[in-house]
Amino acid sequence: GNRTRLEYNDGGGTTTTTYLYNPADQLTRDTVGETNTDYLYDANGSLTKKDDGANVHSYSYDYRNLMTDYDGPGSSNDSTYNYDARGRRITKDVNGTKTAYFHDGLNVVAEYNGSNQLQRTYVTPGLDQNLSLTSSGTTYYHLPDALGRVRQVISANEATQNGYDYEAFGKVYGTPTENLTQPFRFTARAWDPETELYHYRARSYGQALGRFLSRDSLWLSDGANLYCYVRNSPVLYADPLGRADRSTHVFTRSRR
């Protein structure tokens, strides 16, 4: 189903958001107080515009519905993305700051800047099983929970460098502790601060909305709602491929 109402209390009061959808399960408007945000889609069902009357966010995609361009308010967050033949993101350019990604299978194992200088390397033995990262010769370690959500990044002496607490659908509570630049957060997926979206390989995920920006490319593999994230059960499942392939993302629980 679709989220129709959200009441959020941040300790300073309750904020209520209501949501409207069209028959294709596309979010068309949300309302917070007196502010309406409208959403538009292309013929393939991918979100192309988010407009709250004061700020406009625009999104473009390639033929695979992979996001290629983002144009945010002003010019500080404009970005472009490129992919290889397998759909893996290989470069990101945010206002001229370029990052190149090198993969082992589906996992990113190294990042380089626009001058081809190594920035970070990652040890990831399985899909999204991030163990450690090395930056400027120093190694740090990811501490995930049972869903793979990165809770802490620590140094060799166990000092906390980064710390994250999440709501059910991935929004971070408050302001996270971040002394170290590293992308992996909710279910070990890469967070893009320029778009405030998660990169789930085949699709981009909006943690504030709790849904994907594009349709499920496998169609109906995770229910009739093609934008839904893990059947609205984010405390039980993850979706590392963005394709709702349940054989790859179900976390089993022991039975007594």
Image: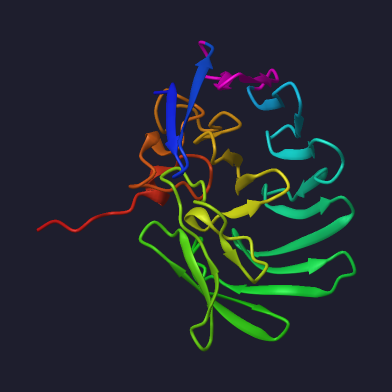
Extreme front residue here?
12
**Measuring 45% from the left and 24% from the top, which residue is drawn there?**
225
Residue 26 painted magenta: yes
In percent of width and height, residue 228 lies at 46, 31
Judge whether 125 appears above or below 170 on screen.
Answer: below
**Measuring 53% from the left and 33% from the top, which residue is drawn there?**
209
Q: Going by the image, does 254 lie left or right of 145?
A: left
In the picture, the quarter occupied by the N terminus is top left
Q: Quadrant of residue 113?
A: bottom right
Judge whether 165 appears above or below 224 on screen.
Answer: below
In the picture, the quarter occupied by the C terminus is bottom left
- Magenta range: 23-44
Residue 63 painted magenta: no
**Measuring 60% from the left and 18% from the top, which residue is drawn there?**
34
Query: Quick check: can you spot residue 3?
Result: no
In percent of width and height, residue 18 lies at 49, 21
Extreme left residue here?
256
Q: Quadrant of residue 3?
A: top left
In percent of width and height, residue 233 lies at 35, 39
In percent of width and height, residue 62 lies at 75, 34
Judge whether 86 appears above or below 142 on screen.
Answer: above
Q: Going by the image, does 119 lie left or right of 21?
A: right
